[in-house]
Image: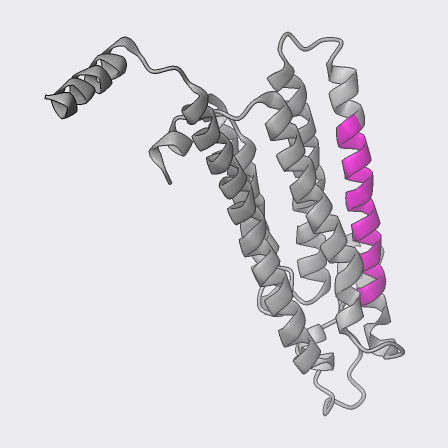
Amino acid sequence: MTQANEHYNPSAKERFWLAVGAQGAGILLLLSIGNVFPAGQTDLSTGLDWIHIMGFLGLGALVVGFLSSLVAKRWCQEAHSCVDSTIITFLLFDIPIVLFLVCQQGGLSRSMFVPLFFLIPGAHLAVERRQNRYRVYIGVGLIALCLMVSCMVSRNTPLNLPTNVGQSDPTLRVYGSLATRITDFSILAPKRFALATLIVSLIALLIPMTQWGIVGFIASDAKKEEPPGPLEGRGQNQRAIGRLA
């Protein structure tokens, strides 16, 4: 991280659009990743349906985030507080969405979406103000709990191998009697699963890196536009005199 980036706080507008961009990229990922898997494979249909449902739920989070920012303007004393409401809205949607998708695919050891757990704090850190970065640590704690839950799901879900004739499909109990069939892509379509995991991992890597790159570019550009201080100007004059001498 450059020195300019380290001491630069993005403006409220920059934070807002960086957060919206990351959210939009995540939505596009969920709505398009199903194209990796073969059409017509019926044993994947439940998992693909849930991926699309969660993608549209993420799109709903984007709309709610916009609305919360507009509503918060009536009570916000500063623009950053309005952006904070948008970012918190995204987090309140995104963390449960990723947790559900990971568990619906068999847990920590079998889901292509595990890298998204690490994307969330990276993207959050890029748009959070320095004085409020304790919120990132709170989010990391929640994600750690999600990892533990998904690990328990993985440990308690039997492998439904094609050779296990007569074995019923494992189910994920969501709430009370509400349950859904677990779709283990790693078993049902292992080659496509490997490709999908690679794509998700690359996206999870590129989104926060792009955010930090944009922040660093804005910071360096802002630093160039700053007028030199009195000491800096004096040093430049002395160097100019030295060269003339």
Residue depicted at x 75% and y 49%: 27
Q: Where is residue 134 in the image (x, y as percent from the top left)?
A: 47, 29
Q: Position of residue 94 (x, y in %)?
A: 68, 44
Task: Report the colour scheme.
Answer: one colour
The answer to whether any part of residue 42 appears in the image is yes
Residue 229, picture quadrant: top left
The answer to whether any part of residue 145 appears in the image is no
Residue depicted at x 73% and y 89%: 164
Main structural element of the magenta stretch: helix, strand or loop? Answer: helix
Residue 165, picture quadrant: bottom right
| Residue nearest the observer in this picture, 195 or 183 | 195
Q: Where is residue 70 in the image (x, y as percent from the top left)?
A: 78, 19
Q: Relative to 148, is 132 above or below?
A: above
What are the residue bounds of the magenta stretch?
47-66
Left or right, 75 with reference to 48: left
Residue extending farthest left: 245
| Residue nearest the observer in this picture, 160 or 203 | 203
| Residue nearest the observer in this picture, 190 or 153 | 190
Residue 203, magenta (yes or no)? no
Quarter of the image with the C terminus in it: top left
Q: Relative to 245, is 90 above or below?
A: below
| Residue nearest the observer in this picture, 31 or 172 | 31
Residue 77, picture quadrant: top right
Left or right, 54 with reference to 8: right
Residue depicted at x 72% and y 56%: 29
Quarter of the image with the N terminus in it: top left
Q: Relative to 121, is 48 above or below?
A: below
Left or right, 44 with reference to 40: left
